[in-house]
Amino acid sequence: MKQWHCSIGGQQYGPVSEEEVHSWAVTGRIKPTDYVWSEGMTDWVPASTVEGLMPTGAAAAVAAAMGPPVAYLKPHRGGAVLALGIIGVVACFICGIIAWVMGNSDLKEMRAGVMDRSGQSMTQAGRICGIVGTILGVLWILWMVLWMVVVMGDRFAGGFR
């Protein structure tokens, strides 16, 4: 089945399956004036110009009667990502790794229109804290390894003389 990219209200979504685009068209999430593009096309075109993409006849009447779409978005986890990121900086760099991974995943879903975007700034802040916490944790481990090599190396070298 074809994969589509859609531009709805200035926000890009995709790749989205053709079945999902049909569902969006029936519920009114995508309108005939919104632009779509798929592999093999030279440029973005209005959805109404793609044969079979938009509902016609009875389906169009049902879509019009339904009114604006109801958004079914996954709730954001911005608070959790931010908390893990802060813990990653302050205490446990493993929490920083988790915040980094969760933040990347959630931001990707927000850009795809699957997750609630209201937590985007918290998610981004938590992701950045996670990155900083991870870097600090790795530097701390390297410092401890270096310290052990230098201090323990001196103790062993002194004991064998």
Image (tube, rainbow, N blue to C red):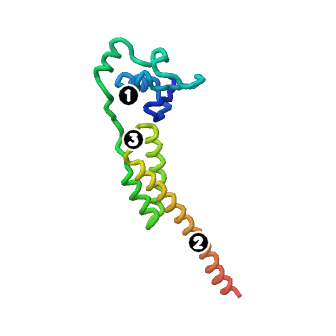
Residue at mark 3 to residue at mark 2: CA–CA distance = 40 Å
Circle 3 crowding by C-alpha within 10 Å: few under 14, some 14–19, many from 20 = many
In terms of depth relative to the viewer, which is nearer, 103 or 147?
Answer: 103
Asked which secondary structure carries label 2, the reply is helix
Q: How many marks?
A: 3
Question: On the picture, is 95 further left or further right than 154?
Answer: left
Single out the mark in the foreground, 1 or 3: 1
Residues at marks 3 and 2 touching, judged by CB atoms closer than 8 Å? no
Residue at mark 1 to residue at mark 3: CA–CA distance = 15 Å
Q: Amino acid at mark 3?
A: Met
Q: Image quadrant for the C terminus?
A: bottom right
- Decide: is 112 above or below 63: below
Question: On the picture, is 12 further left or further right than 147?
Answer: left
Question: Mark 1 vs mark 3: which is more N-terminal?
Answer: 1
Residue 35, position as x, y percentages in the image: 48, 26
Which residue is rendered at x = 47% and y = 54% of the image? Answer: 127
Asked which secondary structure carries label 1, the reply is loop
Question: Mark 3 vs mark 2: which is more N-terminal?
Answer: 3
Which residue is rendered at x = 38% and y = 51% of the image? Answer: 78
Which residue is rendered at x = 54% and y = 62% of the image? Answer: 135
Residue pointed to by mark 3? 115
In terms of depth relative to the viewer, which is nearer, 154 or 2?
Answer: 2
Q: Amino acid at mark 2?
A: Trp
